[in-house]
Every structure is written in structure tokens, then in C-alpha cells.
Amino acid sequence: MTVRFAFTAIDTEVFPPDYASARQRWLRQLATLPYPPEVRTYPCAGAGPDGETLQTDSVWIGEQQAANVVVVIAGTHGVEGFAGSAAQIDLLRLLTEFDLVIPERTALLLVHALTPWGYAWSRRCDQDGVDLNRNAVDFSRPLPETPEYRLLRPAIFMADPQARRAALQAFGDAHGRPALEKAVSGGQYLDPTGPFYGGTQPAHGRLVCEDLIQQYGLAERRLAVVDLHTGLGAYGYGEIICDHAPDSAGAALARQWYGDSVTLPWAGTSSSVPKLGLLDYLWHAAMDGSGCYVTLEFGTYSTDQLFDVLLRDHQLWAQTGNEAERIAHGKLMRRHFNPADPAWREMVLFRARQVVVQALRGVSA
């Protein structure tokens, strides 16, 4: 299947300065499409720093009865939504100018600001401290046990960053670097104030995805899901991470559609370690062997820097009466997950275009 795509100049001005601006730009860009899109809005509890209301929005572009659907998700981890918004706005511009044409029998579903509270407050989690990308577990059953996190929690909340780094390094030296990263970031269900907390019930973004799957009958269509993230991996590179099992039909499709650049955490080939409760698993359950879900992860700075900035964020939000410190640290969070470097932003937009076109070609074949 040929996807018509013409390269146009990359404009890094599509990167928004904040959540409210991102949503307004996204909605304005929708209004320029040459055909009426179908928009759904999902209000979110809580408010932004300036009292603004918070929403997740989605738009269906293409044939209502399309057999094939490419889903592009932005803002699963709130503060990572800056790059996701920019990529979606860029795609909408391409569609408006007919530089990107969706194939027949195929539709594009954009999901914007899946965790809007975290986006507005420059955090990865929601207002309850829940990491949406650890929330896709069966809450009717006993929650996963994470003894390694329990062991490391005192180190994670050390006020002295040097002492914290030393304690984490000692764990890594004893058990290996992958074990350290899995213990910290693999997901935990013990500590609402801590990082990578999966919660005790379905979070806002999970409910949005479940509703979209139902409303559009996505389980009966062929799906290619691209979930946009930032903060892990080589600077500026968009790694295609596939959390399907290595010997599964989904993993085979990912390699067929995206090529040898696909990495698999469960095979040990990715910058990401295997994790609990990924949003991927929710979508996997809606797919048969004809679809696949990938994370497009844009690297920024080192994993050690990621842990430093993220763990300090959780320390500050576990305290009270420190609003000025939280605001100041929010700038560091945005710097880590959304570098202002024009070259980084160009790489993000170019790679996002490339991967979405690959998804459209693959799912439409």
C-alpha cells in the first residue's frame, strides 16, 4: 500500500510552551483540515496551575468504517506530552496541506494529552501519583508484589542526592544495572508518593483508551498504535520499542512494518527494561495477530539524570508548603523531557513523521 507523503520543512515552533497552549493549538489545527473531523473530549479531575480545566481530546480522521486504524497517543506520561503535541500538530499540518494523504480503508486516530494533569503540572503522573504506564493491571486480583522497590525505597527518598546515587549504585553493583532499573522503574503498587506507582484502580487515561476501543469498535479493526514518549535512550533518537513477546505475531509485525530498528525489552535489546502494567497490554488485549503496539521513545539525557530529576520530583510532591520549589523543579522536568534544543526538536518531528508513515503503510498493506 502506497502512502502519499511529501517532505515539507520542519517547523519547531509547533512545540508548545504549556498544556493549555498545546490544546488550543491542537484544536485550531483541527479546524484547518479539509474535511470535518470527529472530536471527542474527556474531562479530567483537577485543574492546572492557573486553574484551567483539563481534558484529553481525540480526533478520528478518515473513513468511519475503515478496516485499518493508526492510533497516535501523546502525553501518556504528562510532561512528555510536549513532544507528542508537537508531533500531532505537525501531522495535522501535513494533512491540511495534502502533504500526507491517508490510504483508502484506513483512518488515523489521534489521542492528545492522555494524562493532562501531569502535562499541566510538569509531572509524569496524574493527580493521584499514578503512572498511567503502570496502570494496566487487573485490579480485581492481588496486585503485583515488588519487593525490590520496597528494599530501595529508603534510598529513593534520601534528601542528599550524592548519598542516594551511591545507594543506587551499590544496588546496581550487587545485582546488575538492568536489575536496578527494573527495581526503580519497573512499576510498584505500594507507595502513592513514589515513582512509577501503578495505582489501585483504572486511571483517567486508561478509561479514555477503554472507551475509545469500545466506541470505535477497535477490537474489530486492524490496529497500529504508536505511543509517543521522551526521556529514555540516545539523545534525539526515536527508538521503536515493542513490548509484545519476542515470539509473538505482534513482534513479527513490528519488525515487518518498522524494520530492524525495532527493539524488544523482553529480548534484552531495548534501552527499556521489562515493566509491569504498561498501557501496551491494554491495547494488546484488543488486538488479534493482525495488529501491534509500539512506543516511540525519544532519548534526552542519561538514565542517571532521569532518575535524579524524577526522584527529586517525587520527594518534593511528597512534602507540603513548598510550592515555589515544585515550580522551580518543574522547569528541570521540562528540560529533561522536552529539551529546548532546536536540533533535538527537529529530530523528533522528522522521526515521528517517518514512523507514522511506516505505520500507515504497514497497517494498510
Image: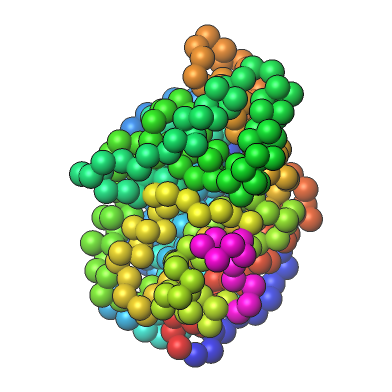
> Is residue 269 located in the magenta-colored stretch of the structure?
yes
The C terminus lies in quadrant: bottom left
The picture places residue 160, in percent across and down from the top left corner, at: 69, 18
Foreground residue among 215 and 245:
245
Q: In percent of the image, x 51 and y 21: which residue is there?
A: 317
Could you tell whether 281 is left or right of 227 in the image? left
Foreground residue among 25 and 351:
351
> Is residue 221 located in the magenta-colored stretch of the structure?
no
Q: Is residue 89 visible?
A: no
Query: In which image quadrant can residue 301 be found?
Result: top right
Foreground residue among 277 and 83:
277
Q: Range of the magenta residues? A: 259-270
Q: In percent of the image, x 68 and y 54: which residue is there?
A: 233
Residue 347 lies, with reference to residue 53, above or below; the image says below
Q: Residue furthest left?
A: 140
The picture places residue 137, in percent across and down from the top left corner, at: 32, 48
The picture places residue 239, in percent across and down from the top left corner, at: 63, 63
Q: In percent of the image, x 42 and y 45: which residue is there?
A: 134
Residue 226 lies, with reference to residue 192, above or below; the image says below
Foreground residue among 142 and 331:
142
Q: Residue furthest top?
A: 321
Q: Is residue 173 visible?
A: yes
The picture places residue 234, in percent across and down from the top left corner, at: 73, 56
Residue 77 lies, with reference to residue 287, above or below; the image says above
Q: In percent of the image, x 71 and y 28: which residue is there?
A: 166
